[in-house]
Image (cartoon, grey):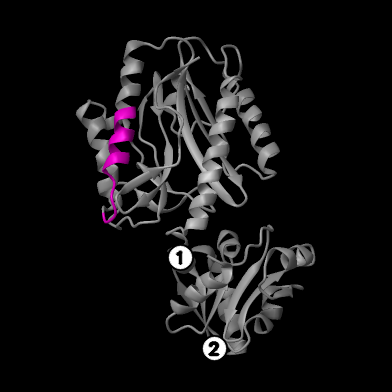
C-alpha cells in the first residue's frame, strides 16, 4: 500500500476534525516513508505536509513524495503555516506531553484552531499489515534466523554474555545498516529466569541453558525471535521445562484464529503451562504485535478483549522462569490468516545443545 493510500485512509477516520498533527516518528515513517530522527506531519484541507529541519530537508525530499516544509524555530512560530485551512486539529494523545498540550492549546487560541485529543488513529491503520508489509517482515525474520545460526558458532563455555550480544549486534548492523530495535537479551544459568535479562559480564558455564532474544530492523520492518539453547547436556528438569514451553508455543500457534481475543490466544499457551504445574512461572503475555516497531498492537495477554484479525503480525513467546535456577522461552513471529497463523520462522524448536 502506498503512503498516499495510507493518508487517504487516515483522512476517512478523522471524524469531526479537519486536520491532524502527528508527532510520533514511527507513525510519520508509516505515513511518509521518512526515516530521520525528528519530524512532524500534518494533514490539512490543502493536503499532507512533512515538516523537517535543515538537517533532513534533502533526505525527506528523496524518501517521501509528500510536500516537505522547512522547520525554523519553535513549533508555535510556524504552526499556522503548517495547518492551512484547519479549524479543528486532532492530536495524537498517546504521543503529546502535558506541557506540549498546554502550549498547543494556548497557540490554538491565538490562531483560532481548536486542538482535540485522539487516540490510536495511525496505530489503528498499522495494526493490520498489507501484503507488502508482510513480505518485508518475512524477509526480516529470515535474515534474523540466518544471523542467529551464525551466532550459535560464537556461543561457547567461557565466553561472556555481553560478548555474545556484541557479536550479534555487529552481525546485524553490518547486514542492515540500522540500529538494533532493542538491546539483545543473552541470559544464562540462573539469569535465564529474568525474562528481560539483558547481557551481563557473566561467563557461560557448562550445563546451563541460555535464553537468546534478539531482533533487527531491515528496511524499516522489525524481526524479533527467541531461542533457548543448552551448553552441553541439560539437567532432566530443565529439558522437561523446555519441552513444556515448546508444547505451549506450538499449541498456541495451531490454535489461534481470527476473532479470538488477545486473552483467549494467551490462554491457549497458558493452559499448557498451568497443567504442567508451572502456572506461577509464566508471568508475561503470550505475544505482541511487530511491524515498524518491535512492540505494537495487538497484545496477546490476559484481560485483552480486542479481537485478532487477518493480517495482524505478532509474536508467540511463552516462557517458564524458575528463580535462581533457569528459564526457557521460545519466540516465533507470524501473520494471522483466515485459517490460522502463518509462522515466518523456520528454525527448529528442538532443544539446540552446543
Residue 318: x and y, percent? 35, 35
Question: In the drawing, does residue 95 fall left or right of residue 325?
Answer: right
Residue 220 belongs to magenta span: no
The tag on residue 301 is none
Q: Earlier in the sequence, mark 2 or mark 1?
A: 2
Kindly report the secondary structure that dominates the magenta region of the rendered protein: helix
Q: Residue at x 29, y 29 (%)?
A: 247
Q: CA distance from mark 2 to mark 1?
A: 24 Å
Q: Over which residues does the magenta segment extend?
A: 246-259
| Other residues around mark 2 within 10 Å, as few (<14) / some (14–19) / many (≥20) | some
Residue nearer the viewer, 229 or 135:
135
Question: In the drawing, does residue 120 fall left or right of residue 265?
Answer: right
Residue 202: x and y, percent? 57, 19
Residue 248 belongs to magenta span: yes
Residue 106: x and y, percent? 59, 81
Q: Residue at x 50, y 14 (%)?
A: 354
The tag on residue 87 is 2
Helix, strand or loop at mark 1: helix
Q: Residue at x 34, y 57 (%)?
A: 309
Q: Residue at x 77, y 67 (%)?
A: 57
Residue 17: x and y, percent? 48, 83
Residue at mark 1:
125
- Residue located farthest toward the left when viewing the structure as drawn: 275
| Other residues around mark 1 within 10 Å, as few (<14) / some (14–19) / many (≥20) | some
Question: In the drawing, does residue 51 fall left or right of residue 262?
Answer: right
Amino acid at each position: 500500500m502506498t503512503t498516499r493510500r495510507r493518508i487517504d485512509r487516515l483522512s476517512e477516520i478523522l471524524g469531526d476534525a479537519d486536520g491532524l498533527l502527528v508527532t510520533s516518528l514511527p507513525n510519520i515513517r508509516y505515513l511518509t516513508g521518512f526515516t530521520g530522527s525528528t519530524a512532524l506531519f500534518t494533514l490539512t484541507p490543502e493536503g499532507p505536509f512533512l515538516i523537517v529541519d535543515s538537517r533532513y530537508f534533502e533526505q525527506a525530499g528523496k524518501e517521501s513524495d509528500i510536500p516537505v516544509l522547512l522547520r525554523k524555530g519553535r513549533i508555535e512560530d510556524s504552526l499556522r503555516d503548517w495547518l492551512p485551512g484547519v479549524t479543528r486539529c486532532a492530536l495524537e494523545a498517546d504521543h503529546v506531553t502535558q506541557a506540549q498540550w498546554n502550549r498547543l492549546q494556548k497557540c490554538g487560541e491565538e490562531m483560532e484552531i481548536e486542538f482535540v485529543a485522539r487516540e490510536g488513529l495511525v496505530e489503528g491503520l498499522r495494526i493490520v499489515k498489507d501484503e507488502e508489509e508482510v513480505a518485508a517482515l518475512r524477509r526480516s525474520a529470515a535474515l534474523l534466523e540466518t544471523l542467529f545460526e551464525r551466532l550459535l558458532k560464537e556461543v561457547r563455555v567461557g565466553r561472556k554474555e555481553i560478548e555474545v550480544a556484541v557479536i550479534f549486534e555487529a552481525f546485524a548492523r553490518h547486514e542492515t545498516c540500522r540500529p538494533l530495535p532493542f538491546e539483545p537479551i543473552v541470559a544464562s544459568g540462573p539469569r535465564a529466569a529474568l525474562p528481560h535479562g539483558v547481557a551481563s559480564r557473566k561467563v557461560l558455564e557448562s550445563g546451563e541453558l541460555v535464553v537468546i532474544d534478539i531482533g533487527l530492523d531491515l528496511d524499516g520492518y522489525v524481526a524479533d525471535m527467541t531461542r533457548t539453547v543448552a551448553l552441553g547436556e541439560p539437567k532432566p528438569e530443565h529439558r522437561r521445562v523446555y519441552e513444556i514451553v515448546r508444547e505451549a508455543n506450538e499449541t498456541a500457534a495451531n490454535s489461534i484464529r481470527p476473532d479470538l481475543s488477545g486473552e483467549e490466544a494467551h490462554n491457549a499457551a497458558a493452559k499448557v503451562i498451568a497443567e504442567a504445574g508451572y502456572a506461577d512461572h509464566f508471568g508475561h503475555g503470550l505475544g505482541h504485535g511487530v511491524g515498524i516497531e518491535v512492540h505494537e498492537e495487538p497484545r496477546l495477554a490476559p484481560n485483552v478483549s480486542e479481537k485478532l484479525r487477518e493480517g495482524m503480525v505478532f509474536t508467540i513467546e511463552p516462557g517458564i522462569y524458575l528463580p535462581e535456577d533457569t528459564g526457557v522461552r521460545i519466540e516465533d513471529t507470524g501473520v494471522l490468516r483466515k485459517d490460522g497463523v502463518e509462522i515466518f520462522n523456520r528454525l527448529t524448536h528442538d532443544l539446540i545443545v552446543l
